[in-house]
Image (cartoon, helix red, strand yellow):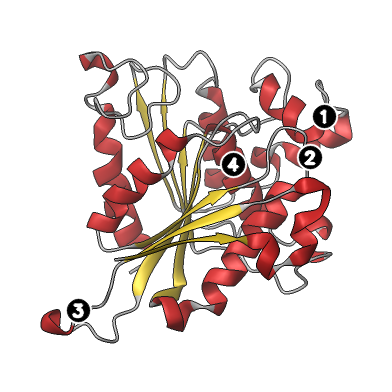
Amino acid sequence: MKCETLHLKEIYPFLGGDGRDAVLDCYLPYNMPEMHREAQKRKTLLICPGGGYSFVSEREGEPIAVHFLAAGYNVFVLHYSVDVHRFPAQICEVAAAVELIRARADEWNCDAERLALLGFSAGGHLAAHYATAFDCAAVRAFFPASRNVNAVLLGYPVITAETGVTHAGSFEHLCGHFPLTADEEAQFSCDRLVRDDTPPTFLWHTAADKTVPVANSLRYAAALAAHGVPFELHVYPFGWHGLSTADAETAANPLPKNIQPVHGWLADAVRFLGDVLA
């Protein structure tokens, strides 16, 4: 397997302003002649870990990548700008990663038309925001030909910017203040941005999540249903926020009730992608 780390500002210099240095970790299995796969194009996954837009969680990067590598994917993990760096830095970095993956699809043996985006928590907001606003003015100013991904996976995502339902800290870091104005709330509430061409989406959450209420996923699922977008939603009764792979390796509090059946989301997500990216 080829592993490399790319600094996006070295490819897109305009992404390097204000000290930003978004990094893309690339995990690219070799095509092996012994397996008659010299020309195989692999389904591809781009991961946006969570962290409240204040840091990028290691627990939601490489440990997730390993599972999808085993399922036959090329995997990329985006360490996007956080903390003092505000919107639109993050969504533009996703656009850059998507463009780069498609531009180098032949070199990296990626199937450019079977590209999925996975986000957790605040990274889930970033993924959902890109999926519903990939062609917004802020993105098109830098990427005039920006394209959407083909499928989306969201784990305990921040979806709405509405006070009392959202995770306030995420928007304090993304926008520099909270609560947001009515116009900002409309701009950043992904459930309000869903449209008929939003990609098929897999969501999972826990009803016991006290950090990002399950209402976030429920609202997004309702919006997808209203627009006729294929989706799959899993709500597990137990489990803390930020479970990642939901096993003893990454679970923030690895009690049995926080692991099973929550760990099953990985197999369900792989199956879902197999269906929608077929």
Q: Quadrant of the C terminus?
A: bottom left
* Circle 1 Cα neighbour tier, 10 Å, few/some/many (<14 / 14–19 / ≥20): some
Q: What mark, if any, has residue 86 been given in the picture? A: 2
Q: Amino acid at mark 3?
A: Met
Relative depth, front residue between 131 and 70: 70
Residue 69 in sight from this viewpoint: yes
Q: What mark, if any, has residue 32 been given in the picture? A: 3
How far is mark 4 from mark 3, CA to CA?
Answer: 43 Å
Name the residue beneath numbered marker 1.
Answer: 176
How far is mark 2 from mark 4, CA to CA?
Answer: 26 Å
Looking at the picture, does residue 228 appear above or below residue 10? above
How far is mark 3 from mark 2, CA to CA?
Answer: 43 Å
How far is mark 1 from mark 3, CA to CA?
Answer: 48 Å
Counting from the top left corner in percent of width and height, residue 214 is at 50, 23
Q: Amino acid at mark 4?
A: Ala
The quadrant in which residue 60 appears is top left
Identify the residue at horizontal 26%, vertical 29% (top origin): 249
Label 4 vs label 3, nearer the camera: 3
Left or right of residue 259: residue 141: right
Q: What mark, if any, has residue 223 been given in the picture? A: 4
Query: Which of marks 2 and 3 precedes in the sequence?
Result: 3
